[in-house]
Image (tube, rainbow, N blue to C red):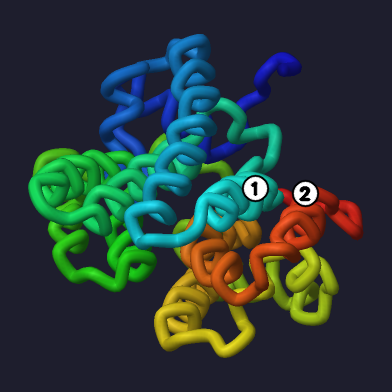
Amino acid sequence: MPEFRAGPDSARYLLAGSGHKVARPFNLRWLLPAMFGADIKLWRAVWWLSWPVAAAGLVWWALAADLAWQQAAAMPVLVLALAGVWGPHVVRPVGVDLPAMALSILAVAAITQGGPWTVLAVVLIVLAGATKESAPVWAALWAWHPLLLVGLVAPVIIAVFNRPAIDEVTATPILRHVHDHPVRSAWEHHRHKLRDPRMVTQWGGCLAALYAAPVQVWAVLAAAYAQLVVATDTYRLIHTAAGPALAFYAVQAVPVPWLGLLCAASAVWWLNPEFQ
């Protein structure tokens, strides 16, 4: 992996890890900065570890839902090949999206398994909520289970004890504009992408989930795209928010003999990808 050059988000996590106050919502993402500080090696280790953890969790989730082993094997390919999951180089490895998604997937797998595993699901989703404040919402939509919303207790508590402040990164003119005018800046960033074919092609095989899609698929997609009203990032947000759920339903919408083709459609980017 090339030398890491921190983007604005990563810079704020490193500031938080060094004990500085940071702007909202970065102040809510307390867990990883508290654990790893500004040590890039530790951030890199957890980033790499998140990939096999997410893959194992996706397989577990599928098997716990009584899907065939071929469907379980296809799920990690569909999710982890998404450009937004890989993310832009300025958040690799100092970022919270992938670790939060991995923890959330494990929580969904555990609650799908049921029984005593439900306790583990609660623990995992609280950790996910302390990693990224929106993680419990996505997990609850993926599993279609309200219990996972208990993870929101983490950001609520953090909001009380870790108040936000305008940090040196957010204080720069462009980022201060984004901070103070989220809807306006989001529109300025996204308006040229409304008919960008990558908004469709970068979903790869996950698009199969739209065939006879249940309400869960439309709910998670609506929530994922609603983020773009107040955020300037695109694929990193929608793919980590909706990717696991779409993969879960996509592998069920396609006959098992066709799953290899479905995986190929995800593993190859037909247009130059946009990660942000």
Vertical position of residue 59 compared to residue 241: above or below: above
- The residue under the point 75% across, 55% down is 260
Vertical position of residue 191 compared to residue 115: above or below: below
Left or right of 276 in this view: 220: left
Comparing 256 with 105, the one in front is 256
Q: Position of residue 234 (x, y in %)?
A: 63, 61
**Residue holding disc 2:** 267
Query: Crowdedness of circle 1 by 10 Å Cα count: few (<14), some, many (20+)?
Result: many
Q: Position of residue 5 (x, y in %)?
A: 67, 23
The three-letter amino acid code for the residue at tag 1 is Val
Q: Position of residue 98 (x, y in %)?
A: 49, 40
- The residue under the point 51% across, 39% down is 55
Left or right of 182 in this view: 7: right
Distance from the alpha carbon under mark 2 to that under mark 1: 7 Å
Disc 2, disc 1: CB below 8 Å?
Answer: yes
- The residue under the point 34% across, 41% down is 103
Circle 1: element type: helix
For residue 208, which quarter of the picture? Answer: bottom right
Say whether disc 2 or disc 1 marks the residue closer to the N-terminus.
1
Query: Crowdedness of circle 2 by 10 Å Cα count: few (<14), some, many (20+)?
Result: some
Comparing 191 with 145, the one in front is 145
- The residue under the point 46% across, 86% down is 214
Q: Position of residue 97 (x, y in %)?
A: 47, 44
The three-letter amino acid code for the residue at tag 2 is Ala
Query: Does residue 237 show up?
Result: no
The N terminus sits in image quarter:
top right
Tell me the number on the disc at residue 97: none
Kindly give the residue lying farthest to the right in the view shown.
271
Vertical position of residue 96 compared to residue 242: above or below: above
**Residue holding disc 1:** 77
Left or right of 187 in this view: 57: left
Query: Does residue 248 show up?
Result: yes
